[in-house]
Image: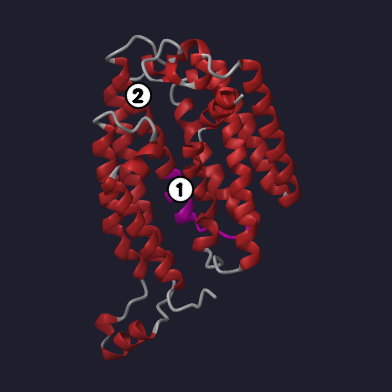
Amino acid sequence: MINISLALIRAARPVHWVKNLSLFAAIVFSGMLLEKALFNEVIIAFLSFNLTTSATYIFNDIFDAKLDRLHPVKRKRPIASGELPIVIAFGAAAVLALFSLYISYNLNFIFYIITLSYLITQILYSLYLKNIPVIDILIIASGFIMRVYAGAFLINAHLSVWFLLCVVSVALFLASGKRRSELNILDNTNVTRKSLTKYKKELLNSYVTMFGNAAWMSWALFTFFESPRASLPVWLMLAEVSRTTTINKLLMVTIPIVIFGIMRYEHLIFQGKSERPEKLLLTDPFLTVAIGMWVVIVVYIFYGGVAIF
């Protein structure tokens, strides 16, 4: 029983929950992070979406069990290895999905619709859509976009068109990078997803380059047009000293960090290490530091000088 429970936890892939932190994007960039009631709602939404994504991972592993057994890495997954019986896995996925829908329905109706749409999309992806080139990348990217806008609809926050472009570009960059990294596996084994056989490295290289450029450019535009006005005494004092030191585009200081992060991630993509983006974000020291610096600076610019308690 203990072994099955541990296998079920592994099948749920809690490490992937780091992707769901994107639900907090809207509350951070709308300036409402310190509003306790809204923050608590986003926390509940985050926990609910964790159940949703875990259900889709289990469903996917059930559908892919036969091919996963032939894969050099995926054959160790609980369902493919036989540690977790398919009947138990299916029942657990159904319970997780229903419970997440119940929570989301009682939280916010639009959030519930997005959660339901995410579940349906991911099941269709697991059943068939992942075998269609280009469509598979768009589906993966849509998952990131749904997370961000689920958080926005939950707190009724407006996100600018520049932020939308940034989210779309980053999502497509991560999705195409995942496929480009997976393509390296094709060189070492004949067992892989069907869509990969229809991609050429040159095409995926162009996708990665195109969306990587779009990601940092859209972020740069967002920081230029949407930076909060400087209000801390130190910035106001500098503005009084000289117009040259007037700063109303503070978010632009994060652009070099974003460019470095994209360059580092592309480096890992072409080394074939980006098949699991969530693992890289947690284990690559350069990416971890860059993301940490980016988060600290963004939060400081939006909330510095505001009492948390």
Q: Quadrant location of the C terminus? A: bottom right
Above or below 290: residue 273: above
Q: Is residue 13 left or right of residue 283?
A: right
Residue with the most extreme front position: 2
Q: Amino acid at mark 1?
A: Val
Q: Is residue 182 left or right of residue 84?
A: left
Q: Residues within 10 Å of mark 1 (few under 14, many from 20)?
A: many
Looking at the picture, tell me which residue is in the foreground, 134 or 6: 6
Residue found 70% across the figure and 44% down from its top = 112
Above or below 9: residue 48: below
Q: Nearer the viewer, mark 2 or mark 1?
A: 2
Above or below 219: residue 181: above
Q: Amino acid at mark 2?
A: Glu
Mark 1 = which residue?
167
Looking at the picture, tell me which residue is in the foreground, 182 or 53: 53
Q: Which mark is residue 182?
A: 2
Q: Quadrant location of the N terminus? A: top right
Instruction: Please tell me whether residue 151 belongs to the stretch shown in magenta.
Output: no
Residue 252, percent from left and from top: 32, 64
| Residue 9 visible in this rendered orientation of the protein | yes
| Residue 156 visible in this rendered orientation of the protein | no
Q: Is residue 124 left or right of residue 136?
A: right
Residue found 60% across the figure and 16% down from its top = 85
Instruction: Read off the magenta span.
Output: 155-169
